Image (cartoon, grey):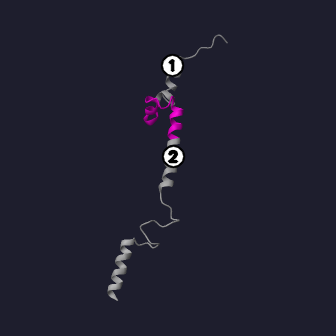
């Protein structure tokens, strides 16, 4: 077993083909550079949490169809158009 020899350059070539924390790019590298995250795995966790918060805020802020907005009286016409239509109808009578 003492006759086994390993090639020194083998590990150097394999590093080119695999994504290692040292080769982080984009927002992951920016988070590490700014000291917000210590490594690529933590940076990706931060980005995932940020995306979940953004989705939650989007669904919270978007108005639902369950209640009418303040700009209508229950119909599809805005209030100012409803008043104009009522005035026009009363003038035609």
Q: Is residue 62 above or below residue 16?
A: below
Is 81 covered by the magenta stretch? no
Q: Position of residue 61 (x, y in %)?
A: 47, 55
Mark 2: few, some, or many residues within 10 Å (few <14, many ≥20)? few
Work out which quarter of the rendered image holds the N terminus and state it. Answer: top right
Among the 4 quarters of the image, the one containing residue 25: top left
Q: Position of residue 13 (x, y in %)?
A: 49, 24
Tag 2's secondary structure? helix
Work out which quarter of the rendered image holds the C terminus and state it. Answer: bottom left
Q: Is residue 77 above or below residue 61?
A: below
Looking at the image, which is closer to me, 62 or 80? 80
Mark 1–mark 2 distance (CA, rounded to whole Å): 45 Å
Q: In this rendering, would 27 be left or right of 1?
A: left
Q: Which residues are magenta?
A: 24-48
Question: Which residue was labeled with disc 1?
Answer: 9
Question: Which residue was labeled with disc 2?
Answer: 53
Tag 1's secondary structure? loop
- Asked whether disc 1 touches disc 2, contact meaning CB atoms under 8 Å apart, the reply is no
Q: Position of residue 28 (x, y in %)?
A: 46, 34
Magenta segment's dominant SS is helix
Residue furthest bottom in the image = 93
């Amino acid at each position: 077993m003492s006759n086994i020899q390993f090639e020194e350059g083998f590990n150097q070539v394999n590093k080119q083909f695999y994504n290692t924390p040292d080769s982080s790019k984009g927002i992951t590298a920016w988070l590490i550079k700014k000291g917000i995250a210590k490594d690529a795995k933590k940076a990706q966790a931060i980005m995932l949490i940020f995306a979940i918060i953004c989705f939650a805020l989007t669904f919270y802020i978007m108005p639902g169809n369950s209640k009418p907005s303040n700009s209508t009286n229950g119909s599809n016409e805005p209030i100012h158009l409803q008043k104009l239509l009522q005035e026009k109808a009363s003038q035609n009578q």
